[in-house]
Each structure stands twice: as structure tokens, then as C-alpha cells.
Image (spheres, rainbow, N blue to C red):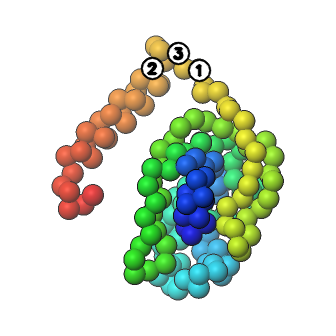
Amino acid sequence: LDFLFTLRKGGNGDFLAGFMTKEAPSSSLLSDDPSGAGSSASAAAYGNLRRDGGRAASVAELEEVGSMLQVINLTQYPNIAGGQVVVMPHKRIRRTKTVSEPSPNIQLAAVTVEDFPEPEVKEDDAEVTELAKKASDKMKELLETSTQYK
């Protein structure tokens, strides 16, 4: 997170390339965790991460196609290590070359990317229409959720 704050202070880091991992993070990543947060509580947290959560040790662990992400907000937690990064997807991209792998000092890989076109979807595609309806219904359901659980 410190790396992102440094980028932002230098006038960079408004956009980042984001890629899903090919596999969900494993608890074995904790043994390589430089923060020393390899506790059993952290192991349980890693077990619950999705494919877009956690740290990748190598660019080879990442999908080829990802998103250009606009950094909306960076928040560092005051009492514990870590923080929150709020991003908004901007456009689809494809990784073309790895410039540098993640390292202990710089935990983000440097890659070159190219624009990747959105897939063409027919307007009368029943599968897409059904998926959009399910997503809309779920969003309506979530909006009705008590703020206590948000």
C-alpha cells in the first residue's frame, strides 16, 4: 500500500492495470508474507479470498486479460498494517510484456498492455438478457439490505 501512496504523491498511480489470478490464493502465501502477518487468523482470511484478492508472487499467476483500473480512493488503516484501495474499471486490457516481476521492495509487477476490445453481444441474446436480469434483481436485493450489514 505504501508503494501506491508513493506513486500518487509523485503524480502517478491514478490508473493501474488489474488482473485476476488464475487460481484462488492459497494459505501457503502466508509463509512468504513479508509483513509477518502469518498467523492462524491470517490463514483463515486467505482461505476466504476470491480470485481477485491477495498477492501474486509472479506475473505467470495472472490472467492475460484484465482491466485498466482508476484509483478512486486510498485509505491506510490507522492502527494495523494495510488499508483499502477503491478502484473503478475503466477499460479492458491485455498484458503484452512483463517489464519486471514483483519483488519484496516493490510488490506490483510492471507490465506493458494494449487495449482489448469488448466482446460483441447481440442485443437479443436470451442468455445475456437473463444474466442482466439476475444482476439487476440481486442489486435491488442488496439495496434493501440493512446498513448494519453493509
Quarter containing the N terminus = bottom right
Element at badge 1? loop
Task: Evaluate if marks 2 and 3 touch, with contact meaning CB atoms under 8 Å apart.
Answer: no
Task: Evaluate if marks 1 and 3 touch, with contact meaning CB atoms under 8 Å apart.
Answer: yes
Q: Earlier in the sequence, mark 1 or mark 2?
A: 1
Q: Residue at x 69, y 48 (%)?
A: 63
91 to 149, vertically: above or below: above
- Between 11 and 101, which is closer to the camera in this rendering? 11
Per the image, the residue denoted by label 2 is: 126
Closer to the eye: label 1 or 2: 1
- Residue 37 visible: yes
Amino acid under disc 3: Lys
- Residue 25 visible: no
Task: Evaluate if marks 1 and 2 touch, with contact meaning CB atoms under 8 Å apart.
Answer: no
115 to 29, vertically: above or below: above
Amino acid under disc 1: Glu
Rate crowding at label 3 as few (under 14), some (14 to 19) or many (20 or more) other CA atoms within 10 Å.
Answer: few
Residue 67, percent from left and from top? 59, 42
Element at badge 3? loop
Per the image, the residue denoted by label 3 is: 122
- Between 103 and 148, which is closer to the camera in this rendering? 103
Q: Residue at x 55, y 57 (%)?
A: 8
Quarter containing the C terminus = bottom left
User: How far is disc 2 from disc 3 in space, using C-alphas?
Assistant: 9 Å
Closer to the eye: label 2 or 3: 3
Rate crowding at label 1 as few (under 14), some (14 to 19) or many (20 or more) other CA atoms within 10 Å.
Answer: few
Q: Residue at x 52, y 45 (%)?
A: 70
Asked if residue 45 lies left or right of residue 137, the reply is: right
Asked if residue 128 lies left or right of residue 59, the reply is: left
Residue 127, percent from left and from top? 47, 25
Amino acid under disc 2: Ala
